[in-house]
Image (cartoon, rainbow, N blue to C red):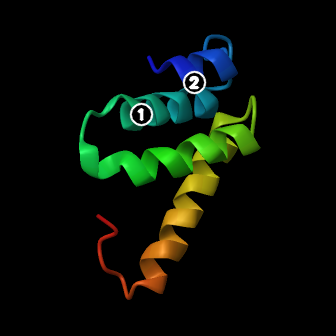
């Protein structure tokens, strides 16, 4: 589990949707792929903007990514 998510969220005892969001966030942050660095940077910002609300942080990340992709004509950001 990612240290940032562990520090910000106590994933045990959360709602099911928060637990699922934690799992998705952890899988992104733990991925060693260098092409995900911008994604991770934006996700860290979303986590900071939505402390104790992983589902809102993930939603914010998805919405921001969608806006960026649409601004580039649907092209991959990588």
One can see residue 8 in this view: yes
- What is the spatial separation of the Cα atoms under label 1 and label 2, in whole angstroms? 9 Å
Question: Measuring 57% from the left and 24% from the top, which residue is drawn there?
Answer: 5
- Classify residue 47 as left or right of residue 22: right
- Classify residue 52 as left or right of residue 43: right
Q: Secondary structure at mark 2?
A: helix
Q: Hey, which quadrant is residue 7 in on the image?
A: top right
Above or below, comparing residue 37 to residue 24 in the picture:
below
Above or below, comparing residue 16 to residue 7 in the picture:
below
One can see residue 9 in this view: no
First in sequence: mark 1 or mark 2? 2
- Classify residue 6 as left or right of residue 14: left
Question: Measuring 62% from the left and 31% from the top, which residue is drawn there?
Answer: 18
Q: Secondary structure at mark 1?
A: helix
* Residue 61: percent from left, percent from top: 56, 54
Kindly give the residue lying farthest to the top in the view shown: 12
* Residue 1: percent from left, percent from top: 44, 17
Quarter of the image with the C terminus in it: bottom left
- Classify residue 21 as left or right of residue 31: right
* Residue 15: percent from left, percent from top: 67, 25
- What is the number of callouts on the image? 2
For label 2, count other residues whose C-alpha is less than 10 Å away and answer few (under 14), some (14-19) or many (20+): many
Q: Which mark is residue 14?
A: none
Kindly give the residue lying farthest to the left in the view shown: 33
* Residue 41: percent from left, percent from top: 50, 47
Q: Which mark is residue 29?
A: 1
For label 2, the residue is 5
Report if the CB atoms under discs 1 and 2 are less than 8 Å apart.
yes
């Amino acid at each position: 589990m990612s240290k940032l998510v562990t520090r910000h969220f106590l994933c045990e005892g959360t709602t099911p949707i928060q637990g699922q969001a934690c799992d998705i966030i952890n899988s992104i942050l733990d991925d060693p792929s260098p092409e995900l660095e911008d994604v991770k940077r934006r996700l860290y910002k979303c986590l900071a903007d939505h402390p104790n609300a992983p589902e809102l942080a993930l939603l914010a990340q998805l919405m921001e990514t969608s806006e960026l992709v649409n601004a580039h004509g649907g092209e991959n950001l990588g």
